[in-house]
Amino acid sequence: MSVLARAAALVEGALATLDAERSLINDLNVYPVPDGDTGTNLFLTVRAIQEELARTSQSDVVAVASAITKGSLMGARGNSGVILSQIVRGMCSECRPGRTLDVDGLKRAFREGTAAAYRAVKQPVEGTMLTVIREMSAAADRLPDDAPLGDALTAILASGHIAVEHTQRQLAALRQAGVVDAGGYGLLVIFRGLAEALQAAGGRLVHAVPTAVADSFAVPRADEPTEMSRFRYCTSFLLSGESLPREYLEDLISSLGDSMLLVGDQEMLKVHIHTDDPGAVLSRVVPFGGISEVEINDMHQQTRERDQRLAAARRAGGTAVVAVVAGEGNKELFRELGCAAIVDGGQSMNPSAAQLLEAVEQLESSDVVILPNNGNVVLTAEQAAGMSPRHIVVVPATSIPAGIAAMVAFEATADAAANVAAMEEALAANHSAEITVAVRDSFVGDVSVRKDQVIGLVDDRLVAKGDTLLEVFEEVVRVLTAYDPDVITVLTSLNGDTPTAEDLHATVASIAPTVEIAVHRGGQPLYPLLIGAE
C-alpha cells in the first residue's frame, strides 16, 4: 500500500469515529463558549484533510504530509479545528523519507504536535485539548523505544482518556456543567479512530484499542438556559499574501473580540476570533492580502439551539435512573453518567421506600430504573417499585462501584427492558471491593481480625488484611486482576490518610500495566477505598 493510500485510510478512520460521536461532542461543548459546534468543527476540519488528500497525486511521504498540513489549515473550523490543525502541522513535520512508524517516531510526532498547539494559543488554558495532547505526549515519552507499537498506542490512548476525565476538575465551567472538555474528548476520539484504522491495516496492535466510552462523558443537564457568550459571532477566514505580519495582525484585531487564533505562515494565515463586528475584523486585515473561506456563525443562536436540543432529549422519554449514593464526589459521578435523581444513603443510612418514591415522582419518564448500590437497600427498592403506577425496575447493584458499572451500560433513550438487560450484563462482569478499618476485634468468616487493622474484601469475601491502606490495596488489586479486568475504578473517601492518586496508579501499573485505572474523589463515609473491576 502506498504512503498516500495509508494516510487516506487513517484519516478515514478518524473521520468515521468523529462522525459517530459528533453529536455527543457538540452537546459537551460549554468551553470557551457553549455554542455546541465543537464536534462539527472537528469533523469538518478532518474532512478537509480527506478532501485535500483526494486531490493529491504525489505519493511520497513529504508530499502527503504537506497535503495533510495544508488541508487541516485551510479547512480548520472554530477554536478546536484551528488547534487541531496545529497539532497536525507539528506531527506531520516529523514525517520524513526513510522514517518508519515506531515508538521513537511517535514520541517525536507527539512532542512536535504538542509544541505547535501551545504556540498557537497566546494564553494557553489547561483543562482543554491542549492538556490532552500534552498528557498523551508525556505518556509516549515514558515508553521504552523498543516497546511494541500496539502497547505504545494502548498506553497513549489510556493516558488521553484519563486526561479527558481530569479536564472537569481543571475548569470551573466544566465542573459547573458536569461535563468534560468537548475539544479534549474530540481529540481522543480522533486518535482512537487513527489507532483503529492502523489496527485494521495490520499495524501490529497487541492489545485492543481502549474505547473512550461516550456514556462516561455525560452531556450537561439542561435545567436552565445557558449563559450566552460575551461576543456573538464566531468569525474565521483565510488571509493570503506576501510576508504577512502575524504578530502585528494579532495586535490589530485583538481589541475586537476574544478567543483569537492566528496560525499559518507568511503566505497564508488562518484567522479565528469571537467578535460582535465581523465586518470590522475583515476591514482591518483586507489591506494585507486576499480573504477567502469566510465563515461567520451566530454563537448566541447556536447556544439557544443547543439548549433546545438538550431539553428535548430530556423530555423525550426513554428511561431515567434513581440511584442511592453516599459521598458528594460519587453523586457527581453518577450524575455525569446520566443518573436523573440521587437519594442520599448507603451503609448505615439506608433510605426508606417513601424516599425512593419521592425521587421517582419528580421525574418525567414513565420508565425508571432504581440502583440500590447496597445489599440492604435492594428489598426496599423492590418494595418502592411495587407501590408506584410507573414502570419501575430494580437493578440489584449491591455496591457503588457495581452501580457505576451499570451506569456505564445505561442508555437514556432506550426503554427500561433494554436498559435492564444491558445493566445486569454489566453487573455480571463487575467485581467490587472495599477496603476499610476494623472497628473491633472480630472474625470475618473464619479469619481473625484485630481492631484498627485494615481489611480488604472482594465480592464480600475477605482477601487481605494488613497495617496500611496501600498494602491491602495492593493485595486486593492482585485478586481483582485474576478476573482479567480492562478497567479498575477507585473511589476514595475524604479521609486525609487515603493514598494519593499517584500511589494508586503506580500500584496498579506495577501489578497489571495494561489495565486502565480511574481514580475519583468519591467522598463516601466508612470506606477509605471502594474499588470496581470490569
Image (tube, rainbow, N blue to C red):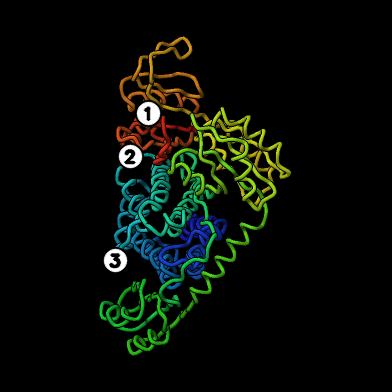
Q: Quadrant of residue 429?
A: top right
The residue positioned 40% from the left and 79% from the top of the image is 275
Marked residue nearer the N-terminal end (1 or 3): 3
Tag of residue 123: 3
| Mark 2 surroundings: few (<14), some (14-19) or many (≥20) residues within 10 A | few
The location of residue 143, given as percent across then percent down, is 32, 42
Circle 2 — which element? loop
Tag of residue 511: 1
Q: Amino acid at mark 1?
A: Ile
Q: Quadrant of residue 251?
A: bottom left
Q: Amino acid at mark 2?
A: Asp
The residue positioned 43% from the left and 19% from the top of the image is 463
| Mark 1 surroundings: few (<14), some (14-19) or many (≥20) residues within 10 A | some
Horizontal side, residue 180 vs residue 105: left or right: right
What is the distance, in whole Å, between disc 2 and disc 1 at their CAs?
21 Å
- Residue farthest along the right direction in this orientation: 389
Q: Is residue 66 visible?
A: no
Marked residue nearer the N-terminal end (2 or 3): 3
